[in-house]
Amino acid sequence: MPGATDTGFFDVVGSKDLAAGSKLSTPPEKVVQVGFRGIDQGRNYSVDGRMNYFMAQMLRLFSRRRVALIMERMVTPKNINNG
């Protein structure tokens, strides 16, 4: 769920508005660095940043429906008209 990675994936699927350069994406080099740091510390998983950690914990705090609505709002481009 958390952590879009700044790769060509979003370009390929046609979601450039959610892709590289957005404040929600992380460079692949940082993803690898965080992963290796977690391995070095003997962790089963690693979550980088407070926002990503919060997003990972959302299902503990809210219903699935509420989480889906929150995530939809976060990833919907602001220039889309809703009617």
Image: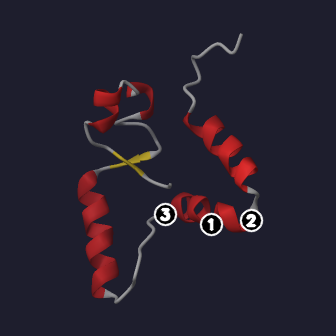
Kind of element beneath mark 3: loop
Q: Is residue 3 left or right of residue 50?
A: left
Q: Residues within 10 Å of mark 1 (few under 14, many from 20)?
A: few
Residue found at x 76% / y 59%:
62
Kind of element beneath mark 1: helix
Kind of element beneath mark 2: helix
Residue found at x 59% / y 58%:
55
Q: Residue 11: image x %, image y %?
A: 30, 28
Which amino acid type is shown beneath numbered disc 2? Leu
Q: How many marks?
A: 3
Mark 2 vs mark 3, foreground winner is 2
Q: Are marks 2 and 3 in contact (CB under 8 Å)?
A: no
User: Where 18 sits versus 36, above or below?
Assistant: above
Q: Residue 5: image x %, image y %?
A: 35, 48
Which residue is at the far bottom?
A: 42
Q: Residues within 10 Å of mark 2 (few under 14, many from 20)?
A: few
Mark 1 highlights which residue?
57
Residue found at x 70% / y 41%:
69
User: Alpha-carbon distance for marks 2 and 1?
Assistant: 7 Å
Sequence-first tag of 2 and 3 = 3
Q: Residue 14: image x %, image y %?
A: 36, 24
Mark 3 vs mark 1, foreground winner is 1
Which amino acid type is shown beneath numbered disc 3? Gly
Relative depth, front residue between 68 and 21? 68
Say how the picture is coloured.
secondary structure
Which amino acid type is shown beneath numbered disc 1? Gln
Quadrant where the image shows the C terminus: top right
Which residue is at the far top?
A: 83
Q: Residue 82: image x %, image y %?
A: 69, 15
Mark 3 highlights which residue?
49
User: Alpha-carbon distance for marks 2 and 3?
Assistant: 18 Å
Q: Are marks 2 and 1 in contact (CB under 8 Å)?
A: yes
